[in-house]
Structure formats: C-alpha cells, structure tokens
Image (cartoon, grey):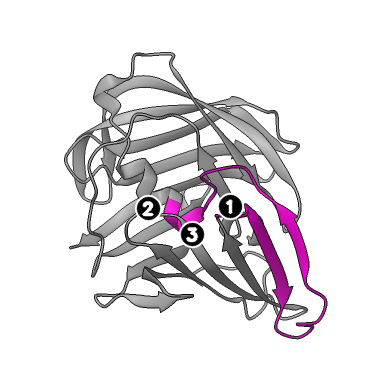
Amino acid sequence: MKKIFFVVFYFVFSVVKAQINPAGESFVYSLSKDGNQAAEIYLQTDKKTSQINQVTCYKITGFAKITAALGIINFDNKITSWIDVKSFKTCKVHAYFDDGKKKTNYIVECNHAKRLLSAYSLEKPNEKKTFTFAPNTEDAWSAFFLIRRTDFSKLKPNDLINFNMITDEEKSQAISLKYLGKKTMTFGKKTQECYILAWASPEIEGIKTKSIRIAITADKEQIPAKMYVDTDKGFFSIELKSFIK
C-alpha cells in the first residue's frame, strides 16, 4: 500500500493543455480485489491556497479506508501534498502510514531551482537525506493533475508517454505508458468514452504488467476513472465512484 501512495514521478511528454483550477475538487475511488471491494480512496483539494516557502500552493490530501480484510491491522494513512498553483510542481509532501506494526511519518521537500529533494521522518528529523531529481518531477497527486492537462487529441495509438518514478525515498525508475486510443468504459454508475493507456515498461515482479490498463475520461476534466491490473496476489481494480467540483 505504501508503494501505491508514495510515488513521485514526472512526464517528459510535452503535450500539455491550458491550466486547470482544481481548488475544491473532491474524488472518491473504490479499490477492489478479485471483484470484491477492499477499500475506498479519497482525494480532496482545499478551496483555499497555502503558502509553502513563499510559494502559493494547492493543498491536496489523500487517504484510504479499508472496507474488507486484507491482512492489514488498524491501517491508517494520509498523504498531503502542496503543489505550486502556477507550475503544478510539488513543493512538499507529508506521508503518514500506520499498519499496526510500524508507523511512517515522512516529509519530502522539493527545491526545483536546485533540483534537490530532501526527505526525513518527523521521528528522526536530523537524519535528513538529500538527493537530486530529474526536471519536472511531480508527486503522485500533482501527476494526477498533470495527466488531466495532457492533450490526448495530439496523441496517436502506440505513442509512448515516458516518465521517471521514484518508487521509494531514494530510488527512481524509468517508466513508459502506451496510448491505445479511445474506448467506452463503465465505472461507478457511469458509462463514458475514455482515453486508454497500457503499461509498456519495465517489468515488475509479482505483477503481470501487460494487464495494466488506465482509463481517463475523454472530456474537459480528463479524470483518471479506472485502472486494473492482474498480480500474483489477485486481480485489482480502482474506479471512480464520485467527483465533485
């Protein structure tokens, strides 16, 4: 679960549409395993902006509620991200996880001018780690909005979207997604035309990467609406239940 939530990555594909204003938006996603609902994921952007190191930011909070037994005891989690309203670059991330056995209370701060990322835990603030990152690095939530700004109308089937993903506090990996075109998809209580992305590379242990599909609504909002993947531990899907703007 931590790897799903604590993700920092950047798109190098340069086809980006105009600015969007996500202030006040609210999303609810349903996570299912083998067809049975396992959790709900919530994503909320504050209506008011915040100041982080003299930069005006959107404050975005995400958390999940376990709705079925997955072998996780008293799981508690919350990720708060502050994103520059002009560039949509991540300024700061606060990630909190508690699985009943171990707590993780992590802070990540981004200096885009120097391309440096500082990471430390609130429990051990003096053990700060600093490392470089590629240009245009985003965290999971800012990338969520970057997807919504991608101009899919300029993509052709089999075009690749390339990005780097930091899979933990100090490791990054090159990723490629393939654009497949449009398809009518059902998610929540809706049926709608969507842009479809497939996983191109790399291979991931325990995951059948060729099975990964991501559907993004083909409308002005371009909301990631559905994702599914087959793994050694079962078939997982995430789909949009509600969106309030």
The amino acid marked with disc number 2 is Ser
65 falls in the magenta region = no
C-alpha separation, residue under disc 1 versus residue under disc 2 = 16 Å
Residue 140 lies in the magenta-colored region: yes
Left/right of residue 139 with respect to residue 185 in the rendered view: right
Residue 19 coordinates in the image, percent (x, y): 24, 48
Residue at numbered disc 3:
90
Marking on residue 87: 2
Quarter occupied by the C terminus: bottom left
Question: Amino acid under label 1?
Answer: Val
Viewer-nearest of discs 3 and 2:
2
Residue range corresponding to the magenta coloring: 113-142
Q: Is mark 3 on a helix, strand or loop?
A: strand
Assess disc 1: are there few (<14), some (14-19) or many (≥20) residues with their C-alpha within 10 Å of its C-alpha. many
Query: Residue 112: where, in percent of width, then height?
Result: 55, 55
- Structural distance between the alpha carbons of marks 3 and 1: 9 Å
Which residue is painted at 56% across and 46% down in the image?
9
Residue at left 67%, top 77%?
73
Residue 37 in view here? no
Q: Residue 8 got which mark? A: 1
